[in-house]
Image (spheres, rainbow, N blue to C red):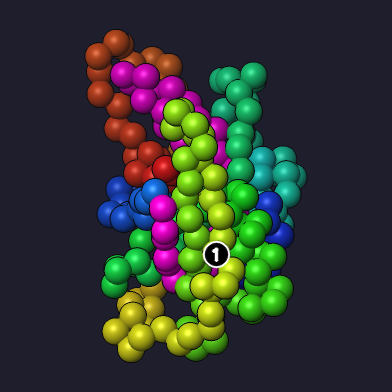
Amino acid sequence: MALAFNQTKGEAQKSSIVTYQYRDGDNRVRLVGDVLARYVYWVTGENNKNIPLECLSFDRNEERFNNKEKDWVREFYPDLKCGWSYAMQCIDNGEVKVINLKKKLWEQILTAAEDLGDPTDPDTGWDVCFKRVKTGPLPYNVEYQLQALKCKAAPISDDDKGLLVNLKSMDDVMPRPTPDAQKELLDRLRSAPSGDEIDETLEDEFNVA
């Protein structure tokens, strides 16, 4: 199961996930629900499209690598490394979206929470206000700066509280695949003739930005 906010350590069906798109300049979101702790591999599929596959050696609940499940990506791509990829839900302009957390921003949020409390609490939580700043010409040349002075405790509006009634756990939003499901997709990726379309179910399932 996914984790409550204050439990985190910082470290196969189609879905209709709406993903939060980070904006240049000022951003403001209200984090809600639980935190999905995971690591993912990026595997190249058709048309050189990167498909995120969850690292099954990493335990979501314990936030550590325990190697209890067979991780087929390691068998197929022994040199491929997995990367930190935590996610949760947020309210943005009256809509619930999945936000794929940026590691340094997440660390800043955890530090601020030591003084401000749990940002996901509907009554005593706070909006996460931050800037996205370009630091160079390449897509990954960006920096995320939490604007702590703007992060003031305030209850969620009544309209937004209504969005929480049917809020799902992140384990339901992004189900953990079984080793068999992971292997099946990897087999299809390996065996598909050039130009064939792959049913990239897990790509929708993880929807990592």
Q: Residue at x 63, y 28 (%)?
A: 81
Question: How many other residues sit within 10 Å of disc 1, few (<14), some (14-19) or many (≥20)?
Answer: some
Q: Position of residue 70 (x, y in %)?
A: 63, 36
The main secondary structure of the magenta stretch is strand
* Residue 90 seen in this snapshot: no
In the rendered structure, which amino acid carries the disc numbered 1? Answer: Gln
Name the one closer to the observer, 22 or 31. Answer: 22
Q: Is residue 43 magenta?
A: yes
Q: Residue at x 56, y 60 (%)?
A: 146
Q: Position of residue 202 (x, y in %)?
A: 40, 40
* Horizontal side, residue 209 vs residue 197: left or right: right
Query: Quick one: quadrant of the C terminus?
Result: top left
Against 164, is 61 above or below? above
Find numbered disc 1 in the image and state the secondary structure of the residue it sits on.
loop
Q: Position of residue 72 (x, y in %)?
A: 58, 29
Q: Residue at x 30, y 27 (%)?
A: 198
* Horizontal side, residue 204 vs residue 141: left or right: left
Q: Is residue 106 magenta?
A: no
Label 1: which residue?
147
Q: Which residues are magenta?
A: 25-54
Name the one closer to the observer, 34 or 148. Answer: 148
